[in-house]
């Protein structure tokens, strides 16, 4: 009798990138990679959509990222955009207000947006169907991985059949949340603090006539701080801090939930879809890269919810890293360029987390005297016009800017390192305005009033010639056949004044819309070519 033989191992699948986790951050990451032609395998342990409205808010930067992958119209169809956010004291009086009608960071979208997470994930996952080189495998989990000089070798398991199989990738992106299997596989610890106060998060549906508090509201009641707001698609969100001794079993009872939401919605018309207890964290991974493995979103950082920046920060991670990966995979840049991902993103994320903590201290005063002092101080401060504008216009939110990284000179210098505005422009011969990003393309772009047709080189850079808003642009909508420049009319009168203010002829934008360089077209393109050729030194300097 011949000895029994084991079944032959299947040949390992080879892809450029494996994305572990297909929540909003993982799905967006895969869309951005698909947009740039990167062969991608996305694995998600769940066999069905999550179906729970966990994250529910995003900002204008997030919408700009969704716009870049061509999914904004689908995502934006059901957004709720609040007009203001009120801060109430224990007596129900407003002591501070953010007026979103006065908030415009210049990025083309509303500053605060509430969405339905199940629908958002559905749109992002459906977006992957546009790319033959992107595959989503549900019911698939990461078992283990190891790295050599050229590849990451993964073992994946189909949770429905319990069958494991190998996959090889050039890079792995861990987008698998706070309990990240990817982070554990590369032995990266978290550092920071977890807050002991448990919260009850209640989501539900309510008709308009059942809403009693129609504006986004932070209830700064020292006895029980709370947050309430209408949301997308007829939903309503309410979160309440638990008091000592209150248990999950007690506080999630229908009668207790009804009593808590009663001041804000009619309990008889409020259909609860989710009621869970959670605690929040301020945690950040010790490092975000282990050779060919990167962490994004909650796998890399977790922050308090008071600024609504948890998901947004993960989306920024994806927008920052994916185009750099594409350059490296296309041999347009040295792999050391990827070091600038953490160099750029970590300080900005830390600033967001710190601002969230400070806002939480305002929100979470836990005794009567501290709350009285807070209310009195904020009311007095807002009698000063500049302070009042600072609060009403949401100016305490950290703006998108990176102090060092992949920029001309390697660090922030004036406008270099900041996000470029997104005004409306028009194409010659058209009266229909479009947002600027619609004409920038997915890669680098150089904008100026005089951009030579033969300027762009490697990597490809789209040339945008900007005409004043009071002109019709060039005489004809078509240029010479060899001229691939795009002509736009600055109908909002933003771009040309921006160039004058910064005393430059042209501005070079990175694919994530951050300013890479200012100067003449020749200067900014030369700076880009030099940075990518010398990206090993850029990465080493940034890491230092």
Image (cartoon, rainbow, N blue to C red):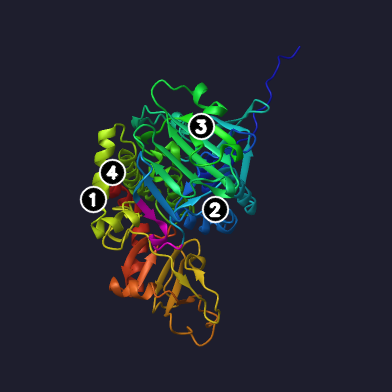
Q: Nearer the viewer, residue 213 or 173?
A: 213
Is residue 98 rendered magenta in the image? yes
Q: Nearer the viewer, residue 473 or 185?
A: 473
Q: Secondary structure at mark 1?
A: helix
Residue sitting at x 48%, y 33%: 260
Q: Which numbered disc, 1 or 2, marks the residue that appears first in the sequence?
A: 2
Residue identifier under label 2: 79
Q: Nearer the viewer, residue 480 or 208?
A: 208
Q: Nearer the viewer, residue 62 or 22?
A: 62
Q: Position of residue 318 (x, y in %)?
A: 46, 48
Residue identifier under label 3: 259
Q: Position of residue 151 (x, y in %)?
A: 49, 39
Q: Is residue 294 visible?
A: no
Residue identifier under label 4: 375
The residue furthest right is 1
Q: Position of residue 132 (x, y in %)?
A: 64, 51
Q: Secondary structure at mark 2?
A: loop
Q: Position of residue 27 (x, y in %)?
A: 55, 45
Query: Where, quadrant-wise, is the N terminus in this rendering?
Result: top right
Residue identifier under label 1: 380
Q: Which residues are magenta?
A: 97-108
Mark 4 or 2: the one toward you: 4
The residue furthest top is 1
Q: Is residue 252 visible?
A: yes
Q: Is residue 183 depicted above or below 229 in this figure?
A: above
Q: Which numbered disc, 1 or 4, marks the residue that appears first in the sequence?
A: 4
Give the distance between the C-alpha atoms of the residues marked 3 and 2, in whole angstroms: 28 Å
Mark 1 or 2: the one toward you: 1
């Amino acid at each position: 009798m011949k000895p029994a033989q084991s079944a032959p191992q299947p040949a390992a699948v080879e892809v450029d990138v494996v994305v572990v986790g297909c929540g909003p951050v993982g799905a967006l990451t895969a869309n951005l990679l698909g947009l740039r032609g990167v062969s991608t395998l996305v694995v998600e342990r769940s066999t069905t959509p999550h179906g729970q409205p966990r994250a529910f808010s995003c900002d204008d930067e997030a919408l700009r990222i969704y716009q870049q992958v061509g999914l904004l119209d689908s995502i934006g169809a059901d957004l709720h955009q609040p007009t203001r956010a009120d801060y109430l004291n224990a007596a129900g009086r407003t002591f501070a207000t953010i007026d979103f009608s006065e908030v415009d960071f210049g990025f083309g979208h509303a500053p605060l947006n509430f969405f339905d997470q199940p629908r958002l994930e559905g749109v992002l996952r459906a977006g992957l169907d546009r790319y033959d080189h992107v595959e989503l495998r549900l019911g698939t989990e990461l078992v283990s991985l190891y790295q050599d000089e050229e590849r990451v070798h993964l073992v994946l398991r189909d949770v429905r059949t319990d069958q494991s199989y190998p996959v090889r990738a050039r890079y792995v992106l861990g987008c698998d949340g706070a309990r990240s299997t990817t982070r554990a596989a590369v032995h990266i610890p978290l550092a920071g603090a977890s807050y002991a106060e448990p919260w009850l998060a209640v989501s539900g549906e309510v008709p308009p006539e059942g809403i009693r508090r129609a504006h986004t509201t932070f209830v700064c009641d020292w006895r029980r701080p709370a947050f309430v707001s209408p949301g997308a698609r007829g939903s309503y969100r309410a979160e309440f801090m638990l008091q000592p001794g209150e248990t999950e079993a007690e506080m999630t009872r229908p009668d207790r939930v009804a009593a808590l939401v009663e001041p804000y919605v009619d309990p008889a018309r409020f259909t609860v879809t989710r009621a869970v207890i959670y605690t929040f964290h301020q945690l950040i991974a010790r490092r975000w890269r282990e050779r060919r493995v990167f962490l994004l979103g909650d796998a890399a950082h977790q922050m308090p919810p008071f600024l609504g920046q948890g998901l947004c920060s993960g989306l920024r991670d994806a927008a920052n890293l994916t185009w750099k990966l594409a350059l490296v995979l296309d041999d347009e840049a040295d792999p050391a360029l990827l070091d600038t991902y953490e160099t750029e993103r970590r300080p900005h994320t830390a600033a967001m987390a710190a601002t969230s903590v400070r806002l939480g201290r305002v929100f979470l005063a836990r005794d009567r005297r501290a709350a009285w002092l807070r209310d009195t101080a904020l009311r007095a401060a807002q009698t000063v016009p500049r302070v009042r504008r600072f609060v009403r216009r949401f100016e305490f939110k950290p703006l998108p800017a990176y102090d060092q990284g992949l920029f001309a000179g390697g660090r922030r210098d004036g406008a270099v390192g900041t996000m470029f505005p997104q005004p409306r422009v028009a194409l010659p011969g058209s009266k229909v305005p479009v947002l600027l990003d619609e004409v920038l393309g997915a890669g680098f772009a150089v904008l100026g009033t005089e951009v030579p047709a033969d300027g762009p080189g490697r990597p490809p850079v789209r040339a945008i010639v900007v005409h004043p808003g009071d002109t019709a642009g060039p005489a004809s909508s078509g240029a010479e056949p060899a001229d691939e420049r795009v002509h736009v009319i600055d109908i909002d009168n933003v771009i040309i004044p921006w160039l004058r203010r910064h005393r430059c002829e042209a501005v070079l934008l990175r694919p994530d819309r951050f300013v890479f360089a200012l100067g003449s077209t020749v200067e900014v393109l030369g700076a880009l070519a030099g940075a990518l050729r010398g990206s090993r030194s850029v990465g080493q300097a940034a890491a230092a």
